[in-house]
Amino acid sequence: MIPSPATQGLVKWMTYLLATLTVIACGFGLWHNDIYQDGPWANAQWLGQDAVTLVLATPLLLWSFHRMKGPSAWKWALVFAGVLFYFVYSYAFYLFAAKLTWLYLLQVPIFSLALMTLSVMLGHIFSDDHPLRGPTSRQRGLIAAYLLLIAAMVAGLWLADIAGHLWVPGHRSDTPDGSAPLIIYSLDLAVVIPLMVASAIGLLRRQGWGWRLTGLMLVKTSTLGYSLMAMALSMYLQALHPDTFLIGLWSVIGMIGTGLTIWFLALLRPA
């Protein structure tokens, strides 16, 4: 699952460059948050996301990269790919939803480097035909239930809001102007949720790709849970009245996801 010697150098310099640009972009975004031009509601969310990316995601990116050596290298490759997926997902919002600032000049290469590195890693992870074995059927059912529950919950929330906009006059989303946040709906409904469902099915059927995709998606949902928690908490601290239920919900998702990720990777081993 780890990169071949021919591509290890490429992954190394892309990872270091990605981490360096991220530290600069997030550090400046935290120090000078009003550089964002999207209004108090969105700026508070950027603040929370920058904080989690700087404090959690970037160190985990570097740590997992350096752990891709030795007998457990393939497990850390799954963690590394999951964190890269978090970067691709998160920075898509800066590129396609935020107003133009000079941070865009950093966010474009961050997104590009994360996407290219993730593509390289996925090629190695899913071309590896070494069989794996891991959790028992009951344990697999628990992990699959978590993934399917999160997928169903998010899909239900977004589809209900979409239906409201289409069929309920005057319906408003939980955004400053009441408009539907289509980038969130599009990324989740078209990318994240199908991958979560696919990973759960592959895991239950004990498919090789299912083991691998489950590890990747557990890391992704854990880091995203903390990011959403920080975004909502940042809004709360700035008296922007977010839904306090969602703060707790994303916190629980992040913590449960972290526990399941550690547990799953501990149980996963070569057949």
Image: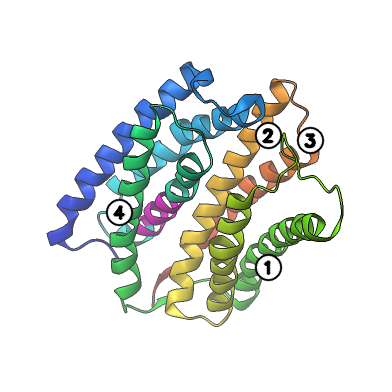
Residue at the spot 53% in from the left edge and 46% down from the top edge: 223
Tally of numbered tags: 4
**Residue that label 1 marks:** 145
Q: Vertical placement of 255 versus 156: above or below?
A: above
Asked which secondary structure carries label 4, the reply is: helix
Q: Vertical placement of 82 versus 205: above or below?
A: above
Measured as percent of width and height from the top left, residue 97 is found at: 53, 41
Upstream in the sequence, badge 4 or badge 3? Answer: 4
Measure how far apart labels 1 and 4 are at the Cα level. Answer: 30 Å
**Residue that label 2 marks:** 232
Measure how far apart labels 4 and 3 are at the Cα level. Answer: 36 Å
Measured as percent of width and height from the top left, residue 124 is found at: 28, 67
* Residue 117, label in figure: 4
Q: Is residue 72 left or right of residue 11?
A: right
Measured as percent of width and height from the top left, residue 24 is found at: 35, 26
Residue at the spot 51% in from the left edge and 66% down from the top edge: 214
Segment colored magenta = 76-85
Residue at the spot 54% in from the left edge and 35% down from the top edge: 49
Outermost residue on the front side: it is 169
Upstream in the sequence, badge 3 or badge 1? Answer: 1
Amino acid at dot 3: Thr
Upstream in the sequence, badge 4 or badge 2? Answer: 4
Q: Vertical placement of 50 versus 8: above or below?
A: above
**Residue that label 3 marks:** 244
Measure how far apart labels 2 and 3 are at the Cα level. Answer: 8 Å
Measure how far apart labels 3 and 1 are at the Cα level. Answer: 25 Å
